[in-house]
Amino acid sequence: MKRILITGALGQIGSELTLKLRDIYGADNVIATDIKKNDSEAAQSGPFEVVDVTDLKRMGEVAQKHNIDTVLHLAALLSATAEAKPVFAWNLNMGGLLNALETAREVNAQFFTPSSIGAFGPSTPKDHTPQDTIMRPTTMYGVNKVAGELLSDYYYHKFGVDTRGLRFPGLISYVALPGGGTTDYAVEIYYEAIKNGKYTSYIDKGTFMDMMYMPDALNAIIDLMEADPNKLVHRNSFNVTAMSFDPEEISASIAKYIPGFKLSYNVDPARQKIAESWPNSIDPSAAKEEWDFKVEYDLDKMTKDMIEKLRPKLEMKISS
Ligand code: VAH
C-alpha cells in the first residue's frame, strides 16, 4: 500500500484508520473521501475529496488524480439502518461496492472492504463459527455482506484485482460513535457509564456477540493488506474476533472501574432479532494461520483504556 484512497473515511473505522495510515505511509499518500467534509482530524490532516460512492465517474476521477494503488472501501450502511431501509441499503452498499471494485480494477489497485459476522445467519453453527460454513443471513445487511464477499472474490478470479476482506465483529472505539449498528450498545454503554453511572441496554441479557477494540481492528486491516499473497488461501473474507460477551459481562467489566455502575434492559425487538441471528462466537484460526492475525485487547484491557480515554473527552464536553 502506498497511495491509498479511503471511502467512508469519516465513519467509525475510517476516522481512526485514516490517521493511522497517515502516520505509517505519510499524510499526502492517504486520500480521505466521504460524502461531505467535516472538521474532524481525519478530514483536516491530509488530502480530502468529497466522493459519493454511488458516483462511479467521480470515484474514478479521484483515483486517477491521486494516482491511487490501494482502495479501502468502508462506506456502507450498518445492520439496523439497513434493516429499516432495505432497498436504499442494497443500492448504497452494493452499488458503492461495485463502483469501488470497478475503480480498483481500472487503476490496478489493491482492494479492501469489511465484511461482518452479520454475513452469518440462524442456520450457521453458532459457537466457534468456522471460516467456511453455511451463510444464509436473514438481514439485508447480511445479504449485502455475503454478496459483497462473493463479488470481491469474483473480481480477484475474473480480473486479478488483489481483493481482501475481514468479517469484523462489533467494533468498539472512543473516537467516532458508530451509527445504525446492532452492536452499538457496546460503545454507548461506556459513554453512559462515565456520564451517568448507568445504562439501559437494548440488547438482552445472554445475547453473546463477537467484539473487538478498534486498535486491534486497524492492525488487522494493515496486517492483512501487507500479507504475502502467496500465503492466502482465503481472501473474502476472514473471520476475525477478539472476544465474545453479553451485556452482563461488559457491565461487570465496567463496574471494576466505575463502582456502582448499574445496567438495566429495555430490549429493542428489531435489533434483538438481528443479534440473535448472528453467531455467539466465531473461529479466527484461518486468519491466524494465513497471515498471523493477533489481538492485544481483551474485555478488561479494552474497558480500562476506553474509560481512561473517554473520561477526559466527556468531561471536556460537559465543561465547554
Ligand atoms: C453492526 N457494528 O452492528 C456493525 C457490525 C458485527 C456488527 O457489522 O451492524
Image: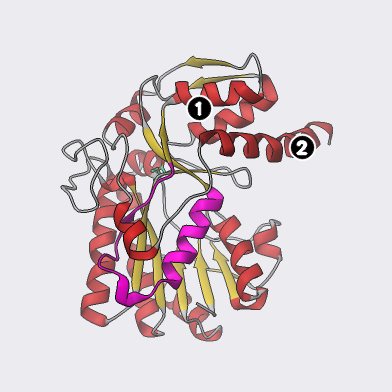
Return the x and y of residue 277 as percentages of the image width and height: 26, 34
Q: Which mark is residue 57?
A: none
Q: Residue furthest right?
A: 319
Of 82 and 313, which appears nearest the observer? 313
| Circle 2 residue | 312
Image quadrant of ligand 1 equals top left
Local packing at callout 2 (Cα closer than 10 Å; few below 14, some 14-19, many 20+) is: few
Q: Classify residue 25 as left or right of residue 64.
A: right
Comparing labels 2 and 1, the label whose residue is closer to the camera:
1
Q: Amino acid at mark 1?
A: Ile
**Stretch in magenta:** 214-242
| Circle 1 residue | 250
- Tell me the residue at 53%/21% (across/down): 252
Instruction: Locate the C terminus and report the quarter of the image it occupies.
Output: top right
Res. 176 in view: yes
Q: Secondary structure at mark 1?
A: helix
- Tell me the residue at 64%/39% (across/down): 305
Q: How many marks?
A: 2
- Tell me the residue at 50%/81% (across/down): 68
For residue 87, above or below residue 280 = below
